[in-house]
Amino acid sequence: MARPTEASPTVFLVLRRMRAPLIVLILIFAISVFGLTLIPGRDGAGQPVRMGFFDAFYFMSYTATTIGYGEIPHPFTGAQRLWVTATIYLTVIGWAYAIGSLLTLIRDRAFRDALALRRFTGTVKRLREPFLLVVGYGQTGQLLGHALDALGRRMVVIDNIPEHVDTLDIDPYVSDVPGLVADAANPHTLGVAGLEHPACEAVVALTDNDEVNLIVAMTAALIRPGLPVIARTVSPAIEHRMRAFGSPTVINPFDRYGDHLRLALHAPAAYLLMSWLVREEGAEMPEPGRPPASGRWVVCGYGRFGHKVAEDLRADGIDVTVIDPNPDVEAAPGLTLIRGDASEPAILARADLAGAEGFVAGTDNDATNLSLVATARKEGPSLFIGARQNRPQNAPLFAAMEIDWLLVPAELAAREIYARLSTPMLWRFLQEMPELGNDWAEETLDRMRAHCGSRLGTLWKATLTTAEAPALQPWLRDGIALGDLLRYPRDRDRRLDTVALMLLRDGETTLGPADDVKLRVGDQILLVGRKGARRLLLDTMTNRVVAEYVLAGREVPAGWVWQRATGRLLTDTAEGDSPVHSSDDT
């Protein structure tokens, strides 16, 4: 996608802008040198002599640069000195013109952009480790960027707002994050940013313009088919158009808010588990909030957000009253619509808040939402309050209101995308987990608290292949009990501080697998546990001596000589002897 001439746009810009000053300087030097060769001088014997071109050029070079070695090869005559005096003033004017033009060029926005582009493309080309192409570095991009940086993931950022890209130099990132101020709607920009780079592992479109996110998803699908694409949108129509190109992961914060609200209505423990797992490692377990009630709800604002919330609530058989001042809004069949400004007491009184169970302030204005929440609290002190926060600067105000269910679209999108990128199996687990119900979620939470404490442990995937688990291969032939695999390598009577969340085998999933489930070659396990548990499990998977103790209870010396001397050898599977892996062996 990159054109050959764009490898050095800075050079062409400098030549174009400095063309006139350079021509002036060349002419001044040429005239000065030529004049010196024509004016006769005198040698030490008083004989007439003319200066050669080389001596004239040498003299003008050190004179015009203010070095001044003196008159060569002989002292000048009056005519020569008069000519040199004139040329000195000419060169001063020429240099002033050239330096002024150069300073103007340095301050020129186009030159700075070209210089930044050259530096950016060079940095991207030199990347050798996998990186994510992040388009849009607003609030969502910044939250996601810091979370991914903590995992050691590299990024390349594009944003059309210079202030957003400038924050890359201020934010405390572990690794350098190349950033470019450009319009991502131009497919060529994505090419310059490394879309075709072999190390680009995914594209994340997070701009606040759904059309731009659509173009990014389309470009990635057409230029790099099969490359994972994650895009944010709040428009169902744009989401449908995105899915026409490949299989992108589309995050709609408004849609997810409604889904989470329905999940909290039916299975509050499942929602609590979900909201904990999508946070960063070490995050404190969220406090169980007041569960939403299933009575009548009042929704203020019937835009995209309000429309989606009302639709999700009504899908659960809940009566919804909507308040919206737009006269062109058409209510869905069976929906109670009150036209007017909800901030007016008379309009809000018609909604009968005293007889409602829930209230959602869902306009696109934070001041309006805060005032609506305050009014609703007075009218119905027991109301379950939901609200939408549009601007990050207003976070302290919403926090002070102690809202039961707050939507911050940027944070919700960042958490969902982080879960998708950090551990892909986690995304599938979150999609299937609600089907198991509230009791299963409560049991899983209890197990996580018992093994991980109140802070979220490390989430990782263990793959039982020959490459990643060579020490387990003799046992995997007949199957390993999950509980046996999760034993402590130094004391097999203890269990590792880890919980198996999901087992993936041949595309089929088992959520919350029991300890007696038999593991086979190629199985993938989603685990959560303390930091040390991951390293200890890795020892069992890769060290045959550790695996002998953990799975068979046999303490085998690490060295071959000691194995021969003591007669305690590693299990010989080449002769067909099946290793013993019963938990009763000593």
Image: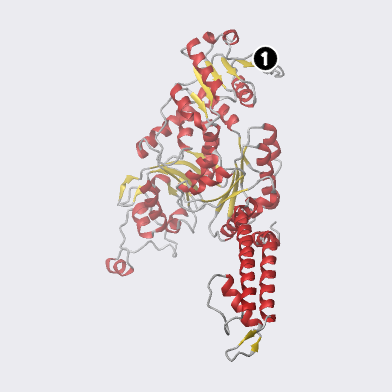
Task: Kindly identify which residue carries mark 1.
Answer: 334
Q: Quadrant of the N terminus?
A: bottom right
Up/down of 405 relative to 273, above or below: above
Up/down of 4 relative to 329, above or below: below
Say which residue appears at 62% left-offset and 66% top-offset.
Answer: 89
SS at mark 1 in the image:
loop
Q: For this view, does 568 lie left or right of residue 430? A: left
- Image position, residue 261 (x, y; %): 54, 25
Protein image colouring: secondary structure
Q: Nearer the viewer, residue 558 or 77?
A: 77
Say which residue appears at 46% left-offset and 38% top-offset.
Answer: 279
Up/down of 30 relative to 253, above or below: below
Q: Nearer the viewer, residue 189 or 298?
A: 189
Q: Is residue 246 visible?
A: no
- Image position, residue 73 (x, y; %): 58, 85
Q: Nearer the viewer, residue 469 or 27?
A: 27
Q: Say which quarter of the image contains residue 92.
A: bottom right
